[in-house]
Image: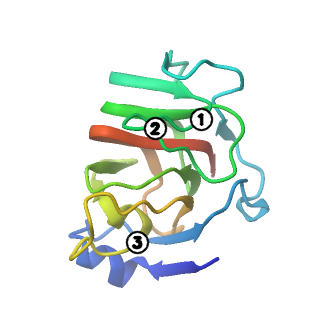
Amino acid sequence: MRTMTLIAASALALLAAPSHAAATITFTTGVGSLPTTIGAPDFSQTFGVGAANGTPFVAGPGETVSGTVNLYNGDVSGQAVGPVNKTDNFLSILNGSYEISFAGGKRAITFLIGGLDAYNTVVLNFVGGGAQTLNGRQIIGLSNVGAPTNSGESGLVRYDFAPSDPALSSIVFSSSQAAFEIDDIAAAV
């Protein structure tokens, strides 16, 4: 298991981040559950259990979906590669997007990813305006230079935002192909 931590002052500057987005990105491969270090999350989404592969996801309060966004309970070639060690449902974004809006803003967010691809995108929107877009391996704090289209990283991603910077107002997960798989999202103030 490897853990990579990048301080935003250097990592996000390389990613053309807005100057106010001082975040720490932590990625741990092969993790199948949420860490206790996030504290008491005041938002969580686990996508439940028992859905048949390919079941369309229905957005709840504060959530928005567009395109093809489905639930899976196992890997399906060309459609979904779930996070490691998962036995319940996960979300697969197949040429579409899934957005979560947070009332009051969040200072930390974690989520599990399945097989990471170059066409996966995370957009971090901040309270008061401004956004940060991360594509492919940038989502886990790495460079896309020389990376394969289907790099396949799977594990736990965590973004921490400094108290002096704007809080996270929403996060958008999207994929322009098949697919971006996510699960066990948790956020805290």
Is the Cβ of the residue at disc 1 closer than 8 Å to that at disc 2? Answer: yes
Residue at mark 1 to residue at mark 2: CA–CA distance: 8 Å
Q: Earlier in the sequence, mark 1 or mark 3?
A: 1
Q: Find out whether the residues at labels 1 and 3 contact each other: C-beta distance under 8 Å.
A: no
Residue 156 x %, y % = 59, 60
Report which residue position mark 2 lands on.
Answer: 80
Label 1: state its secondary structure. loop
Q: Secondary structure at mark 2?
A: loop
For badge 3, the amino acid type reads: Gly
Q: For the residues marked 3 and 2, what is the alpha-carbon distance in whole angstroms?
A: 23 Å
Total numbered labels = 3
- In this view, the residue farthest toward the bottom is 10
Asked which secondary structure carries label 3, the reply is loop
Residue 150 position, x and y percent, is 32, 57
Q: Which residue is mark 3?
A: 141
Q: Quadrant of residue 11?
A: bottom left
First in residue order: circle 3 vs circle 2: 2
Q: Position of residue 15 (x, y in %)?
A: 25, 71
- Residue 74: mark: 1
- Few, some or many C-alpha atoms within 10 Å of disc 2 (few <14, some 14-19, many ≥20)? many
* Most foreground residue, 117 or 57: 117
- Look at label 2 and name its amino acid: Ala
Identify the coloring.
Answer: rainbow
In this view, the residue in front, 40 or 69, is 69
Quarter of the image with the N terminus is bottom right
Tell me the quarter of the picture where residue 176 sits.
top left
Identify whether 71 is placed above or below 100.
above
**Dot 1: within a 10 Å radius of its alpha carbon, few (fewer than 14), some, or many (20 or more) residues?**
some
Instruction: Name the residue type under label 1.
Output: Gly
- Furthest toward the front, the residue is 77
Q: Residue at the spot x=64%, y=31% of the render?
A: 89
